[in-house]
Image: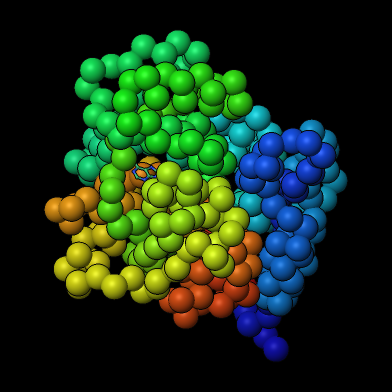
Amino acid sequence: MSEDTQSPCYRVGIAYNLKHEKEGEPEDEQAEYDSISTIRTIAGAIEKTGCKAVFIEAREDFPEKIKKADVDFVFNIAEGKGGRGREAQVPSILNLYSIPYTGSDETTLCIALDKGIAKKIVKSRGIKTPVFFIWKNNETDIPSRLRFPVIIKPVSEGSSKGILGTMLATNRNELKKLLAEKWARYRQPLMAEEYINGREFTVGIIGNGKEKRVFRPMEIIISPDANPDGSRIYSFHAKTNYERYVKYECPARLEQELEEKIIRVSEQIYDVLECRDFARIDLILDEGGNPYFIEINPLPGLAPGYSDYVMLAENNGVEYDELIRLILNSALKRCGMKTV
Ligand SMILES: Nc1ncnc2c1ncn2[C@@H]1O[C@H](COP(=O)(O)OP(=O)(O)O)[C@@H](O)[C@H]1O
Ligand SMILES: [Mg+2]
């Protein structure tokens, strides 16, 4: 084999945060973190490319561990610890040591994790997003412009964390009560967002620039008995009991024109937030067929057989190992490194 065709055999560190469940904690407390089986599956896919996978859990000793690991590249799936900038912790440290990594940079990850800031930026491009209001502390003054019903969610969470129990308020009193409850539980800014009663879609994107590929959208259909309030919210309860309450339809049944519109809007969102390598976008259609931006996940979950992004890829003909290889290669190419 000539040098050119040989696999570059990189040492690829996987940066991740594991669930460390404690007895008695709320059921959604660890929702954002990964299980070791997901990390092992990612490692297996990396090794199939000829690279060496090195496990690095992103705890407080991450800076020392990453220095010692002597890796060429990092596959980043780390959620980080604490605060709305937590997903930026690992990328920032990697930047500090000039280690290239997969996925969006620290700035995009911070912005996307703050649903309010992300919505303001997306809205500035003329893309529709439900009207919202954010309370930064436990005051509960309610602006008159908010139309009910509204959904209440913590501003900086994912994986449906905080989307459980009572989620909707139909009037000011209910909203006040819910804000007090959620503040006591999550101790972080809360968002009330006008509830769009419509079909929900999620869109996966992979790659950069001209090589970007948008997977055909997946519709998330929630059974009416999934939530106590009868809503079609993709709640923590619905997601963790998806076999019972969720039907995933991919490709979604959409007229071509509407599908193209959803894909176009998703790509615009990916670009305006300067995402890299991969991301997943949640949208809801109103009665008039207008896609409303709900949120973007530039670090979407990669749990095999469970995460929406993985389902999107598989339903678009990209199996798990290939998905990991494509993410890695998008990043390697972007960094001017030889692909695997
Ligand atoms: N404005 C809204 N109108 C209707 N449903 C919503 C709205 N915002 C969120 N939802 C529902 O709640 C789910 C979780 O909200 P999302 O903001 O995507 O949180 P997460 O980051 O946990 O995925 C969505 O998938 C959707 O079903
Ligand atoms: Mg979501």
Q: Going by the image, does 211 lie left or right of 313?
A: left
> 276 or 263, which is in the foreground?
263
For image coordinates 55% across by 70% down, the residue present is: 323
Q: Is residue 1 above or below residue 149?
A: below
For image coordinates 56% across by 67% down, the residue present is: 243
Q: Is residue 6 above or below residue 233?
A: below
Residue 19 position within the rendered picture, expressed as x and y whole percent measured from the top left = 75, 47
Q: Quadrant of the N terminus?
A: bottom right
For image coordinates 45% across by 37% down, the residue present is: 167
> 99 or 181, which is in the foreground?
181
Ligand 1 image-quadrant field: top left
For image coordinates 57% across by 31% down, the residue present is: 85
> 100 or 176, which is in the foreground?
176
Residue 116 position within the rendered picture, expressed as x and y whole percent measured from the top left = 39, 31
Hey, which residue is sitting farthest bottom in the picture? Answer: 1
Q: Going by the image, does 289 lie left or right of 319?
A: left
Q: Going by the image, does 245 lie left or right of 274?
A: right
Q: Is residue 325 above or below residue 89?
A: below
